[in-house]
Image: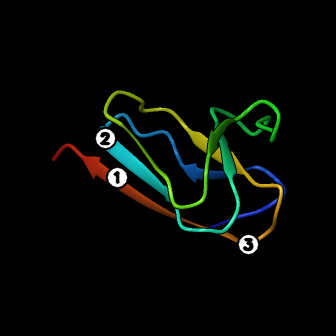
Amino acid sequence: MQVGTTPVCVLPANPKRLSYSIVNNGTATIFLGADQGVTIDSGEPLPAGAMVSDDRDKENVYAISPIANQDVRITELLEP
């Protein structure tokens, strides 16, 4: 998935989600937030090459980057 200079939903809300991981496979820090209002000033930073995971959050995850076309890899584990 590509993250750019406008917020994009990288992981839609899912009540069956057990866990997820997001890997920033790009060259710039991306910033994560809970809604489309996320900015590079308000989001949680995820540096290039870093990964974040969560086993409680079932809500939307949005991302934005100061540089276009950042490669982000998402893994989501769902209950059967």
Type of colouring: rainbow
Question: Which residue is more in the foreground, 21 or 12?
Answer: 21
Q: Mark 3 belongs to which amino acid?
A: Asn
Q: Could you tell me which secondary element the residue under label 3 belongs to?
A: loop
- The quadrant in which residue 36 appears is top right
Total numbered labels placed on residues in the image:
3
| Sequence-earlier tag: 2 or 1 | 2
Q: Distance of mark 1 from mark 3, alpha carbons?
A: 22 Å
Q: Which residue is mark 2?
A: 19
Q: Could you tell me which secondary element the residue under label 2 belongs to?
A: strand
| Image coords of residue 25 (percent x, y) | 54, 67
Contact, CB < 8 Å: mark 1 with mark 3? no
Q: Mark 1 belongs to which amino acid?
A: Glu
Which of the numbered marks, if any, corresponds to residue 40?
Answer: none
| Sequence-earlier tag: 1 or 3 | 3
Q: Which residue is mark 3?
A: 69
Q: Residue at x 20, y 43 (%)?
A: 79
| Image coords of residue 18 (percent x, y) | 26, 38
- The quadrant in which residue 16 appears is top left
Left or right of residue 21, residue 71 in this image? right
Contact, CB < 8 Å: mark 2 with mark 1? yes
- The quadrant in which residue 35 appears is top right
Q: Mark 2 belongs to which amino acid?
A: Ser
Q: Which residue is mark 1?
A: 76
Q: Nearer the viewer, mark 1 or mark 3?
A: 3
Contact, CB < 8 Å: mark 3 with mark 2? no
Q: Is residue 58 above or below residue 80?
A: above
Q: Residue at x 46, y 52 (%)?
A: 22
Q: Distance of mark 3 from mark 2, alpha carbons?
A: 25 Å
Left or right of residue 4, residue 48 in this image? left
Please tell me how crowded label 1 is: few (under 14), some (14-19), or many (20+) other residues with Cα within 10 Å: some
Q: Residue at x 27, y 50 (%)?
A: 77
